[in-house]
């Protein structure tokens, strides 16, 4: 009798939901930590004097660590077992959360995010394995629907609750918010998750893991520091060249192994490759836009963290309703067309955000986000099923791992790239706007006269009034430059999703084999 069968015999029919609930505790913990920090970024910038470029590492450090660990999941389970892997991941997550909450500086804070991301890279794929191992095939859809609602509600409610904690206490408390879920998961794991069973783990692909980690680190550091050091600097050139070399070495090494960390032969499947490309773009746009929105409304519209979190809540609640319905539609309609429709809705949402400014109403912004999340709800089930439908049963595990890996890789690169775009475009627009502020600008002269009169009426002398006028105009110019840069960033997200429609339409099932074709042509006998 296997460990899973022993636990099922002990707890009866309820065991399936007990195991699923245990997995959900871990997933909620890591998803909360992935999303809730976004509403705290402006406060963290103020607390540690970080630049916007440095602050985006709070998101990318988590995503990079999560991405690097995901391909290791299968080996870790075979070597240590489900219970031990889950428990260790939650312990690492607790340590990372505590480090983030008590961090004295930005370095320790980023380290905490790395530990949280590493834990997520192990625990999130575990949840899928647990559900597939305890539910029969005809019950997995129902289980995934219930599990999916819980997963979706975490990022829907998390930012709003995190905003309340920040406004009432401190940004540090957002790191402690997920601790009860992680602690509960550790306790439940000792009761309901199976211990390690006899299995052949094989040798761990340490070199492949090192090359993958090096490629990610070099790429993300190069993107992060490129704006500061200059894209033509020797250091940035070496970092990006090193990322390319590490990636090529990883590809060559993985193709030599019988049991690679990441099965690259999957990308030679012309039915799987379009889904992989769309998944990469989806991760970049989704995580990138989730990073941009709270940053915009807090820095340029003056939203409190609570209000920023509430802005995202309607979209999360709508997604919880759309997701189960989209799962059913993906079984009945063309996965290619459903994915393409979702991509176009998300692209339209991002395109509408090009109209943002300091006066954009709360519900207009929330409505644009809702539209994008409806599109996301259509994409997720159809894209995953469409990408995996051409794989053999033996390839499904590696295929699902590759899809998760690519989504997180896209997210890590997307957040970094959009942070670079935002900073570059802000500087560009500031320079262009400043070039128009000349002595011959009649409108500028009129505004200066009016402002000077206002400051003098307030009691300032002529020199002080002139200085206040210049300072105020500089702030307005910077705010306008930032607004235009955010618009450019949202436009880039829209373009990415629009471009993804092409490969999405190639998500077609492979042609049936000869026996399947004969069965399909056979007349139905009544």
Image (cartoon, rainbow, N blue to C red):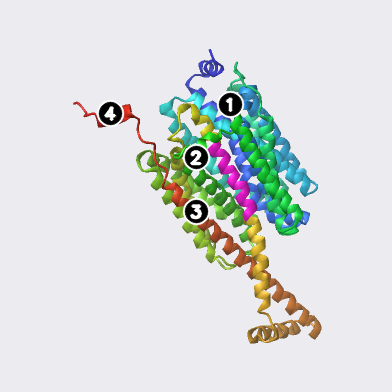
Earlier residue among tags 3 and 2: 2
The C terminus sits in image quarter? top left
Residue under label 2, please give it: 149
Q: Nearer the viewer, residue 120 or 341?
A: 341
Name the mark nearer the viewer: 4 or 1: 1
Q: Secondary structure beneath disc 2?
A: helix
Q: Position of residue 198 (x, y in %)?
A: 60, 16
Marks 1 and 2, how far apart at CA: 38 Å
Do tag 3 and tag 1 residues touch (Cβ < 8 Å)? Answer: no
The count of marks equals 4
The image shows residue 256, relative to residue 235, as above or below, that is above
Q: Position of residue 406 (x, y in %)?
A: 56, 42
Marks 4 and 1, how far apart at CA: 35 Å
Name the mark nearer the viewer: 3 or 1: 1
Does residue 296 appear in this view?
yes
Q: Residue at x 52, y 30 (%)?
A: 397
Instruction: Spot the residue most to the top.
Output: 1
Q: Judge from the rendering whether residue 506 lies leftward or rightward of residue 293; answer left or right.
A: left
Residue under label 4, please give it: 518
Instruction: Spot the residue most to the left.
Output: 526
Query: Would you call the spot at circle 3 few (<14 residues within 10 Å), some (14-19), or many (20 or more)?
Result: many
The image shows residue 187, relative to residue 349, as above or below, that is above
Q: Which residues fall within the magenta stretch?
A: 402-417
Residue under label 3, please give it: 497
Query: Would you call the spot at circle 1 few (<14 residues within 10 Å), some (14-19), or many (20 or more)?
Result: few
Q: Judge from the rendering whether residue 220 lies leftward or rightward of residue 136; answer left or right.
A: right
Q: Quadrant of residue 24?
A: top right
């Amino acid at each position: 009798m296997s460990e899973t069968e022993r636990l099922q015999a002990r707890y009866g029919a309820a065991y399936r939901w007990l195991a699923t609930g245990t997995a959900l505790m871990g997933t909620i913990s890591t998803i909360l930590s992935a999303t809730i920090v976004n509403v705290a970024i402006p406060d963290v910038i103020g607390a540690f004097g970080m630049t916007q470029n440095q602050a985006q590492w709070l998101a990318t450090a988590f995503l990079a660590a999560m991405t690097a660990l995901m391909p290791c999941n299968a080996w870790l389970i075979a070597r240590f077992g489900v219970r031990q892997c889950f428990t260790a991941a939650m312990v690492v997550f607790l340590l990372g959360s505590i480090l983030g909450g008590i961090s004295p500086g930005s370095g320790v804070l980023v380290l905490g995010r790395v530990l949280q991301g590493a834990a997520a890279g192990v625990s999130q794929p575990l949840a899928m394995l647990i559900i597939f191992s305890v539910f029969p095939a005809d019950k997995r859809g129902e289980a995934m629907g219930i599990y999916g609602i819980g997963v979706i509600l975490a990022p829907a409610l998390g930012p709003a609750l995190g905003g309340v904690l920040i406004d009432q206490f401190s940004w540090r408390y957002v790191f402690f918010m997920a601790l009860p879920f992680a602690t509960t998961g550790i306790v439940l794991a000792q009761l309901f998750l199976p211990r390690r069973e006899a299995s052949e783990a094989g040798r761990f692909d340490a070199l492949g893991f090192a090359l993958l980690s090096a490629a990610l680190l070099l790429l993300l550091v190069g993107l992060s520091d490129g704006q500061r050091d200059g894209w033509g600097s020797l250091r940035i050139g070496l970092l990006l060249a090193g990322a390319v070399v590490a990636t090529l070495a990883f590809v060559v090494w993985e193709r030599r192994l019988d049991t690679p960390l990441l099965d690259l032969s999957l990308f030679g499947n012309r039915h799987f490759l379009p889904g992989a490309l769309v998944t990469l773009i989806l991760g970049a746009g989704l995580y990138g836009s989730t990073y941009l929105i709270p940053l915009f409304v807090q820095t340029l519209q003056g939203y409190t963290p609570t209000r920023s979190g509430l802005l995202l809540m309607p979209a999360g609640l709508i997604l919880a309703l759309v997701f189960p319905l989209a799962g059913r539609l993906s079984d009945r309609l063309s996965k290619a067309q459903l994915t393409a429709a979702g991509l176009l809705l998300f692209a339209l949402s991002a395109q509408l955000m090009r109209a943002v400014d300091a006066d954009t109403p709360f519900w207009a912004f929330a409505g644009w986000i809702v539209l994008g999340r409806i599109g996301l709800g259509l994409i997720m089930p159809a894209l995953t099923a469409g990408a995996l439908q051409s794989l053999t049963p033996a390839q499904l595990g590696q295929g699902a791992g590759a899809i998760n890996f690519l989504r997180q890789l896209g997210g890590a690169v997307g957040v970094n790239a959009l942070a670079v775009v935002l900073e570059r475009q802000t500087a560009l627009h500031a320079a262009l706007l400043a070039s128009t502020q000349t002595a011959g600008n009649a409108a500028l002269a009129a505004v200066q006269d009016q402002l000077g009169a206002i400051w003098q009426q307030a009691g300032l002398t002529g020199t002080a009034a002139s200085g206040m006028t210049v300072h105020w105009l500089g702030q307005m110019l910077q705010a306008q430059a930032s607004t235009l840069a955010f618009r450019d960033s949202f436009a880039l997200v829209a373009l990415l999703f629009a471009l993804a429609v092409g490969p999405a339409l190639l998500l077609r099932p492979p042609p049936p084999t000869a026996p399947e074709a004969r069965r399909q042509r056979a007349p139905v006998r009544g």
